[in-house]
Amino acid sequence: MNAWQMSIWCWIIFVVGMILMLPALIFGVLGLVVEQGVTWIAFGYGMYLSMAVIRGGDKRLARNGLPGTAVVLSADQTNTVVQAGEFDWEAPYVWKYGLEVTVPGWPTYKTMLYICASFTVGETIPVRVARFNHMSVTIDRDAYNKEYNSRTGSADGSPTDDFGAVPANAERFATMLRRSSAASTAPDVADELTKLAALRDRGILTDAEFADQKAKLLAR
């Protein structure tokens, strides 16, 4: 179960708990206290997942998880908005990414990642994976920031450009602008289609997945 699914269950438990507040009185004050305790714990954890884990990645998992890499198979912007982070690759919208994860010693597998970050289809990103729940994946922020800053020319590990300026990594900035404005040009679509075709030829994407992503690109 990934962070997005867990957050949904937390909100369901919270809503059900609020509805059952009065019926819980049947079991006395103790029953009400237990019921409300579960309700507000679910609320707190749901807020943590929404504002911390989905916003910028699970920091606890990033520290303790197993290191690996993931190929971005699909990228879909949701309608959920969370405050953007400090790096240019971080996005105000929550994005739903389909990933093919590789961890040393494990079979390659697919999972989903919901995060406020801007990645491109075909990109390989460093990730951390939960030891006992391999579907729980988060971006390895430290490793990715080092890679990102090396591309943008930062010597001290800090971002070198403001979002409003043209950064050294012009290709990534152009992709971010296309996503934020929901617009793209024919050469951009052709480039994305080439990446998708390469993933299909490598066997990472099935023909059906390729067709689905191709239709989404052409519909932009």
Image (tube, rainbow, N blue to C red):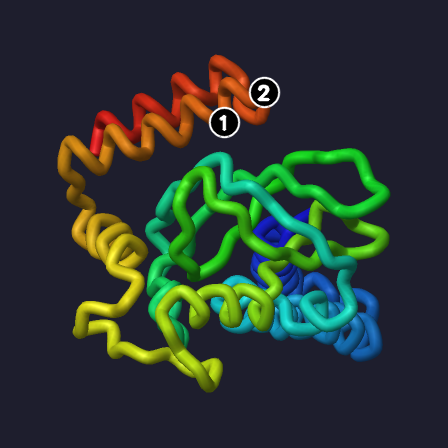
Q: Which residue is mark 2?
A: 203
User: In the rendered image of this protein, does residue 190 appear above or below residue 50?
Assistant: above
Secondary structure found at label 2:
loop
Residue drawn at x 37%, y 79% is: 159
Image location of residue 177, percent across then percent down = 21, 56
Amino acid under label 2? Answer: Gly
* Dot 2 crowding, Cα within 10 Å, few <14, some 14–19, many 20+: few
Q: Is residue 97 visible?
A: yes
Image mark for residue 130 = none
Secondary structure found at label 1:
helix
Left or right, 24 with respect to 148, comes to right
Image location of residue 13, percent across then percent down = 65, 58
Q: Give the quadrant of residue 188.
A: top left
Say how many tags the image has: 2
Left or right, 110 with respect to 183, comes to right
Residue drawn at x 52%, y 62% is: 54
Left or right, 5 with respect to 153, comes to right
